[in-house]
Amino acid sequence: MEGTYLEVNLRKITENSARIREICDRHGMQVLAVTKGFAAIPEIVRAISDGGIDRFADSRLMNIKALREHGFANEMTLLRIPMISLAAQTVNYADLSLNSEYAVMKALSEAAAAAGKLHRVILMVELGDLREGMLPLEAIRTCRKAAELPGIRIAGVGTNMGCYGGILPTRKNLSVLRLVADAIRQETGLEIPIVSGGGTSSLKLVYDGTMPPGINQLRIGEGLLLGTDTTRGDVIPWLKQDAFTLRAEIVEIKNKPSKPIGESGRDAFGNIPVFEDEGIIRRAIVAVGKQDVQPSEIIPLDPGIRVLGASSDHTILNISNSENHYRVGDRISFRLSYAAMLTLCTSGYISKKMLRA
Ligand SMILES: *Cc1c(COP(=O)(O)O)cnc(C)c1O
């Protein structure tokens, strides 16, 4: 089925992958391509791999499992700290995982030993963003204990920034990660080959040449896919921003008032909506709704269009100021935020069209 669809330009993703790979290579950084933003759709994974990044990471074990079933034998890292109840599946599908709990590492150790595997763990260190991670002293202590566990190997340390607390990675806070890695090496004699310094928001430090020495891995999603860095509110000028486009089909066009008529209650989601009275406007409804994407997360390419709002299955647009003469059946194109890309890719109701040109 087609109708409203998400268009993915694979060539642009390959180009972004090649640019990121080139810049990170030049600075001695390994790159993991983060696939959770597009539900690990295999064609997109292949496009990234064509650009030269061949290590993948996802927060959903199900996505990693699906890629394995598609025949991808690449190194894969589970990004979300593992659920202890899924320790066996984690070591079965992922080569590495990010960890912050000794109990989970013990469970991974038992599962890996039972399966005759060696699972590599990255210890997450809390540096201020306040999502996952151990405080530095706890990380050193836990490393010493976890080093004794069979079936797992401590492959490195990592941190996460700009995800929950909106804290930006800097030369200063990433230097602390390097210090923690050094302290662990001294205290335990472990090699700690990987020092994983964050996601897209850390890419700027590589590009600027301000990344502290000793940080040697990044896990990149948003920059690779959308060419943006939301935490900094930036466009990344050396990457493409137009790999993903939503093309939503118009199902109604009418001239109607801008302010609803009648006694006000709540909308379909229980909120009390507020409207400005701009008189009669030309309105279009496109066949996409909150079940697929939040209306605030899509940006019309036509500068004369404004998104007014949405219910589950309909998104309402003000097209009064557009210079185009839209008709029912035409499609309106939108750029996407990371959240919009994520929910549209996940939605089983939205067709995906892969462009190879
Ligand atoms: C999602 C995620 C990333 C990728 O972040 P981007 O900002 O999309 O580059 C990196 N690390 C972890 C742990 C993540 O969950």
Image (cartoon, rainbow, N blue to C red):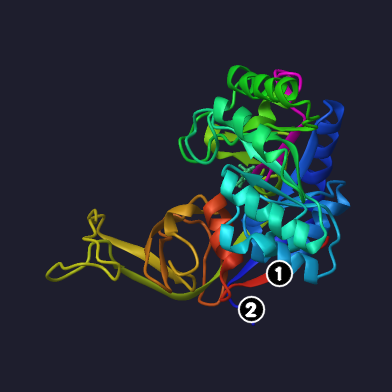
Q: Which residue is mark 1?
A: 353
> How many C-alpha atoms fall within 10 Å of the one at disc 2: few (<14), some, or many (≥20)?
few
185 falls in the magenta region: no
Residue in the foreground of this view, choosing between 165 and 240: 165
> How many C-alpha atoms fall within 10 Å of the one at disc 1: few (<14), some, or many (≥20)?
some
Quadrant containing the C terminus in the rendered view: bottom right
Residue at far bottom of view? 1
Is residue 253 shown left or right of residue 106?
A: left
Residue in the foreground of this view, choosing between 307 and 210: 210
Q: Which residue is mark 2?
A: 2
> Height in image: 276 above or below 268?
above
Mark seen at residue 270: none
Q: Are marks 2 and 1 in contact (CB under 8 Å)?
A: yes
Q: Position of residue 11 (x, y in %)?
A: 81, 54
Residue drawn 18% across the image and 69% down it: 261
Respond yes or no on whether mark 1 lies under 8 Å from ligand 1. Answer: no
**Amino acid type indicated by mark 2:** Glu
Residue 89 shows up from this direction:
yes
Residue at far left of view? 263
* First reached walking from the N terminus: tag 2 or tag 1: 2
**Please, what secondary structure does the residue beneath circle 2 have?**
loop
Residue drawn 81% across the image and 57% down it: 117
**Amino acid type indicated by mark 1:** Lys
> Height in image: 30 above or below 311?
above
Q: CA distance from mark 2 to mark 1?
A: 9 Å
Q: Position of residue 287 (x, y in %)?
A: 49, 74
Is residue 263 shown left or right of residue 172?
A: left
Q: Which residues are magenta?
A: 207-223
Is residue 184 shown left or right of residue 232?
A: right
Residue drawn 76% across the image and 19% down it: 213
**Please, what secondary structure does the residue beneath circle 1 have?**
strand
